[in-house]
Every structure is written in structure tokens, then in C-alpha cells.
Image: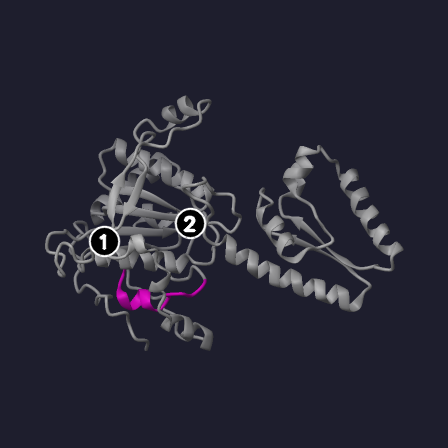
Amino acid sequence: QFQRHPCRTPPLQAFSAMSQPEFAPKPYKRARRAYSALQKERLAAECQAYLPAVLEGCPQVVKKQAIPASEKDADTIKGLFPQTYDTPLVEFAAGIDGAAGKDGASRSPVKVGVVLSGGQAPGGHNVIAGIFDGVKRWHPESTMIGFLDGPHGIFTGNFVEVTAEIMDGFRNTGGFDMLGSGRHKIESEEQFANSMKVCNAIGLDGLVVIGGDDSNTNGAVLAEYFKAKGCKTKVVGAPKTIDGDLKCPPHIPISFGFDTACKTYATLVGNVAVDALSAQKYYHIVRLMGRSASNIALEVALLTRPNACLLGEEVARDKKSLRDLTMDLADMIEQRSKVGKDYGVIILPEGLIEFI
């Protein structure tokens, strides 16, 4: 229905990597059957202009020294991850598009798997699209595998082959419904062994775990297991969480999903503030997501300027009790009442109770 980007390639007609019949791709049955006007506009949008110049074409990989752990944690991390603790930092340098020939003759096709893990975050489908376009740009016959409904799909061998037709139905759109997500973890020895069995049977060169802090920790453990067992599949984590609590400046300044979530919540809180100002007789208490971190609450407060915003980290720092917080809010309400303002907006972070 929509014009495809000229560099996108048609789907493969055969899936030759399967050496074991029980690990064959499932028929894809999750295509969206209808689109809103906005979704149609987004599907047709050309987003290559947003691509960093260094990632155009086929960038060169530059290996740097491993990022050292903090001195107090170094021995613990080395003990937990003896195979991967010294993995070098990888950076990208600009490459030359078509340096190996337009047909990619000097490159070999790669097989890369992707899995969505945990709660959904804005941008998930475009992360998958970026990987898809990247492996196809590397070699037209490269293959992407999508594991269905979270990590459970890895160790049970529940997956599909992602074709251009499938991918083009989800570009620039929200949700995680292209593949589905799940909160399962790969924890038992049997699950680790089955995960490696599936990846070996498919012949995966890489596996991208798109998830938050728990999911990326699980991915790190899986990477350690694969390397210890001699599995060729490299595990890569993509930082996905609206909570904004998965970051490692300057390497990971913020996780994807945080910015859009904050703008969305700010719109809602701004509407509530206008309602409070219009009626001038209510206090609205808005509780925002973010788990233990107060990053979303703080960012939305900076965007909307409510009358009060409680931050869990400040509550812990100042050792405030429930009575202290109650008195602070009561004092604020009383002070506003004295100037004739019996209305307002108060923001609470989801994980506040953990800090009291």
C-alpha cells in the first residue's frame, strides 16, 4: 500500500539456515489490518535525514579499550563475568557506501535476531527498522529474525523471519505489537542451554535484546554464557525504558522512550493544570510512572511547573517521613489559600513510597 524506500530489498524466498526442522520460522500473522490517517502519514515518512552521518552507508568499527569498572566493583564484576568483563568499547567511524561493491560481493550475509523485552516504549519499532536496514545495507541477503513475545521466544524457538513487507508495516509507529514483548527472564540452566541451541540452529551472528535494566542484565548474563560455551552469537543490548534509569554518560546519555514519555505526560499534566486554573476549586494529584527513579516526575515538573513535585531521591537524602511530607503539602496548600488560590497540581513519582 505504501511506497518502499529504494534501498529496501524484497523478502528472501528461502530460509536456508535451519538445520533442525523444529526450529523453523513461524508464519507471520500480526500485520496491522487498518491504519489511521496519522499512521499512514508516519508510514510514508522518510526518516533517513535523522540518521547520524557516521552511520550512513556501512560504518567502520573502531575498537577501543574496555571501559574499566569502578575500583570497588571491579573484582565482583570480573568474578561474575570472567569471559566478557574486558569486552572492548566499540565506536563507529564513517565508512564509504558501497566500498565493497554495490552488490556487497566482498561481504558475507549476516543473520541477526531481535527480541523486545519488558514494557513498551516509544521508538521500539524504529529500533528494529534501523537494525533491519543496517543488515540489509551490509549485504542484501542478510536475514533478520524476530523472536515473538519476549525472551520466552528465544529459548522456545518461537520466531519469524522479518521481511521488508513486515517491516514496512510498522515504521515510525508506536507500540510493540510487531513482535510482542514479555517480562520473562532467561534464568535456568535449561533455558540458557535451549537459547544457545536455538541460536546455533538458526545460525545467528548476533542477538539484540531491546529492553530496560533488568533485560540488559539478563542479556549480559546470556552473552557471558554464549562466550563461555563457544557460541558464535554476539549479544547486544539496546537501552529501552521510559523510566530514564538506564544510562551511562557519556556512552549512554539516556534510554530511548524517555523523551517521548515525558512530552506525553507533560501534555496531560498541562491539561490538568489548565483545568485546575479554570475551575479554581480543586487540587489534582498526578502520579507518574518511572519505578524507583523520579526522572520522569522531575522532567515533567520542569516542563509544566506544578505547585509541588515530590522526588524520591530528595526524600531519601533529607530522611523525610510520611508526616514530614504531609505537613509540607499542607503548608503549601494553606499558603496558597491565604492568597485566594484553593487549587493546584501536585506530582508524585511512582516509587515514592520506597524512599519514605
Q: In the picture provided, is 176 more to the left or to the right than 267?
A: left
Q: Is residue 162 magenta?
A: yes
Query: Is the N terminus in the top left, top right, bottom left or bottom right quadrant?
Result: bottom left
User: Which of the 4 image quarters holds residue 56?
Assistant: bottom left
Query: Is the C terminus in the top left, top right, bottom left or bottom right quadrant?
Result: top right
Type of the residue with mark 2: Ser
Q: Residues within 10 Å of mark 2 (few under 14, many from 20)?
A: many
Q: Position of residue 259 (x, y in %)?
A: 51, 55
Q: Sequence-wise, which precedes: disc 1 or disc 2?
A: 1
Q: In the picture provided, is 41 more to the left or to the right than 289?
A: left
Q: Position of residue 33 (x, y in %)?
A: 39, 74
Q: Residue visible at 33% across and 48% down?
A: 208
Q: Residue visible at 19% across and 63% down?
A: 12
Depth check, front residue: 21 or 141: 141
Q: Residue visible at 70% across and 55% down?
A: 306
Position of 141 relative to 73 (above/below): below
Q: Residue visible at 38% across and 27% down?
A: 80
**What residue span does the magenta drawing correspond to?**
161-174
Evaluate if marks 1 and 2 touch, with contact meaning CB atoms under 8 Å apart.
no
Disc 1 versus disc 2: distance between alpha carbons? 28 Å
Q: Is residue 90 magenta?
A: no
Position of 40 relative to 323 (above/below): below
Give the labeled residue for mark 1: 58
- Please say whether residue 99 is visible from this viewpoint: yes
Give the labeled residue for mark 2: 117
Circle nearer the viewer, 1 or 2: 1
Type of the residue with mark 1: Cys
Considering every residue shown, the one lying at the far left of the view is: 105
